[in-house]
Image (cartoon, grey):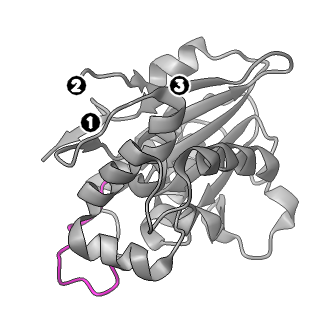
Amino acid sequence: MTNDFVQLSDFFAQADWNSKIYLLLRHAERNHITPADKDYGAHVGLTDRGRRQAVALGKMIPAFGDAVYFSSPVGRCVETAKCIGEGRKLAGFVDNSIVGGASDAVVGTNTKVVPIDELGDFFVGDKAAYERALDEGFYENICKWLDDGEHAAFLPLHKRAEQMREMMFSRSSSRFNIFVTHDAWIVPCLSHFCGLKFEPKCWMNFLTGLAFELPEKGDVKVTPITAMETGWLHF
C-alpha cells in the first residue's frame, strides 16, 4: 500500500484561489472504543492529543476567505470541528458566519458548528443489519461492501458517494467548507472518488479524508488529504 494522501499544508499551498474548498474529514484522535461499548463508542471523546491535532489543522486553513463548520452530531466530531475553528482563530482569522442562521448550531468560544444528522449515518441502509455488521466485524464488513458495492447493511456505495458530495455542495458555498464525520463514511468516498484500497488491517488515519475543489468554471478536483504524518493506520 502506498501513501496516496497529500499533506493538507501542501494541498492548500497549490489550491486555486478562485475555487471553493470542501473538506470531508475524519475526526481527530479519540479515546479507545472497546467491544463492551453498548453505544458503539458514541460517548467516546477526543484525546488531549486529538484536540491539539485538530487545532493544528485549523491553523493550516488560509486566512483569506470565510469558513463554515459542519459535523456529525456525535460529540467527538463536533469537538473536532470546534477545535479546527479555534485553530484558525489562533492563526489570526476569526469568522463567525453560519449557514442559514441555523438554530441548532453548537457554539464553542468563537466557533460555530452545525451538526447534521446525515453525517452521522449517511450510508446506513438497514439499521438492524448495520448493528449486526458492527458486532460481526466492522472493518471486514466495510471492506466487503467496498469490494462488492452492495451490502445488506449499507446503501449502494457508488450512488451514495456521489450524493455525499452533492449534499456537501448544497449545504454551503463559503470559501472553506469543513465537514467532520466518521471513517465509515469517508472510506467509501475515498474508494469511489480516488480508487483507494482498504483492508481490515490497513485503514485510514484520523484527520484524513478528501478535499473537493469547486472552481468557478471547469470540473471539480478531488484530492485525498491528511493532516497527519500519514493517511494510513496499520493494525
Instruction: Quadrant for residue 39, please give it.
Output: bottom left
**First to last magenta residue range:** 28-40
Residue under the point 28% across and 87% down: 38
Q: Position of residue 140 (x, y in %)?
A: 24, 56
Q: Amino acid at mark 3?
A: Thr
Do the residues under discs 2 and 1 have CB atoms within 8 angstroms? yes
Q: Main secondary structure of the magenta part?
A: loop
Instruction: Quadrant for residue 63, please give it.
Output: top right
Q: Amino acid at mark 1?
A: Trp
Q: How many marks?
A: 3
* Quarter of the image where the N terminus is located: top left
Residue 128 is one of the magenta-drawn residues:
no
**Badge 3 local density, few (<14 within 10 Å), some, or many (20+)?**
some
Q: Is residue 95 visible?
A: no
Dot 2 falls on a residue whose secondary structure is loop
Extreme bottom residue here? 38
Pointer 2 residue: 1
Closer to the chain start, of discs 1 and 3, is: 3
Q: Does residue 118 appear left or right of residue 150 in this picture?
A: right
Residue under the point 43% across and 60% down: 151
Dot 1 falls on a residue whose secondary structure is strand
Q: Nearer the viewer, residue 159 or 139?
A: 159
Residue under the point 38% across and 25% down: 5
- Classify 4 as above or below 170: above
Q: Which mark is residue 232?
A: 1
Q: Does residue 1 appear left or right of residue 95 in this picture?
A: left
Pointer 3 residue: 223
Camera-side mark, 2 or 1: 2
